[in-house]
Image (spheres, helix red, strand yellow):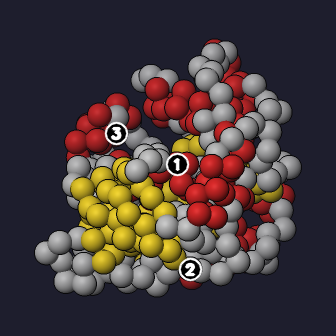
Amino acid sequence: MKKFALPLLLCLLTGATWASQPASGTFVASQRCEAYLSFRKQTNPGPTKAEPGREYRIREIDERDYHWLRIEMPGVAEPLRWVPGDCGSARDMDLTKPAARETRQSSAGVCQTPGLQDSYVLAVTWQPGFCEYKLDKSKSKQKPECRAMDSGELNIAHFTLHGLWPNKKECGKNYGNCAKSDIQLSEETLSLVKPWMPNFQFENNFGNYEWQKHGTCQTEMDDDAYFRKAVTAVRTFNDSEVGQYIRANIGKSVERRELLEILKRTHPDAPNSFSFLCTDNRLHEIQIRLPANFREGPSLAGLIGPQPPKTHSAAPGECSQERILIEKSGR
């Protein structure tokens, strides 16, 4: 039986309607994540979570974008559960339909070819929520910016840059790793980026990872220009009405519908561009869809441009409850 890396499986043409197909193999979780009875409805009685390092048998795969795997979880009531593919890795993965295998093989090169993006995703982090709740404690202690926040050495009360991700629709979330190239940022660029990507205040590991995985898949900018454009886009969101509203409520809970109302005032289509991501209903990230020719600044409406209606289900980890807690930096 052939062995397929999970990123290759995710790089498939999306279907018009939801369907699944039988699959076999082993799924090894790399993080603790929700295991849903229905990923479309985000139902998870229990709640049940996949555990890091544990192996599970694969039973099905979502045919729409090949992002969701249905695994068997022994000892759990209603043991067949859906988990997102980026929760871990698949081993000895095999699909039963020959057409799916052919699509998988022919799509692989496209998903690592630079300059083919049809859109972008801007991922902005709410660093206190990310360090405190998104990461487990062992991973949080490995990140110097999280350690500095925990000790009080670093205080962050604004949104930060996770990444600017070129997107190609047919590749799902796997358009990336287009070239091997380390960043070599100028001192001027580093000074600009450090407050907005705090890992750069201690090392460049995360920035280098983001450049290699995502930045190399666009061809218009070198690494300096890419990070400058990304930071300007984050600042545009941070200074927008919705960004200011969130920052004015640090340490409090905000209503999700209020965030959407603010976005509608910015642009009627703006809510279609945003996914608010939570851990235990605490905000840790916002992902914003951008057109391929987006222009950073000066306004949020200009940044996102007109957006088509959402046709996808909720993103993994999307805030599901009405009230969202905005965590405060430090202990």
Q: Which residue is mark 2?
A: 19
x, y percentage for residue 74?
17, 72
Q: Quadrant of residue 24?
A: bottom left
Task: Give the numbered dot on residue 146.
Answer: 3
Q: Residue at x 79, y 69 (%)?
A: 307
Residue 53 to residue 56: above or below: above
Amino acid type, residue under disc 3 in the picture: Cys
x, y percentage for residue 159?
54, 50
SS category of the residue bearing label 2? loop
Report the front residue among 23 and 316.
Answer: 23
Marked residue nearer the N-terminal end (2 or 3): 2
Task: Give the numbered dot on residue 312.
Answer: none
| 276 displayed left or right of 216 | left
SS category of the residue bearing label 3? helix
- Number of on-image labels: 3
Q: Nearer the viewer, mark 3 or mark 1?
A: 1
Report the front residue among 204 and 215.
Answer: 215
Amino acid type, residue under disc 2 in the picture: Ala
x, y percentage for residue 128?
39, 51
SS category of the residue bearing label 1? helix
Residue 12 visible from this viewpoint: yes
Task: Give the numbered dot on residue 7.
Answer: 1
* Spatial separation of the CA atoms under disc 3 and disc 1: 28 Å
Residue 95 to residue 204: above or below: below
At label 2, counting other C-alpha atoms closer than 10 Å, the crowd grade (few under 14, some 14-19, many 20 or more) is: few
Residue 133 visible from this viewpoint: no
Q: Residue at x 70, y 58 (%)?
A: 170
At label 1, counting other C-alpha atoms closer than 10 Å, the crowd grade (few under 14, some 14-19, many 20 or more) is: many
Q: Residue at x 60, y 72 (%)?
A: 64
Amino acid type, residue under disc 1 in the picture: Pro
Marked residue nearer the N-terminal end (3 or 1): 1
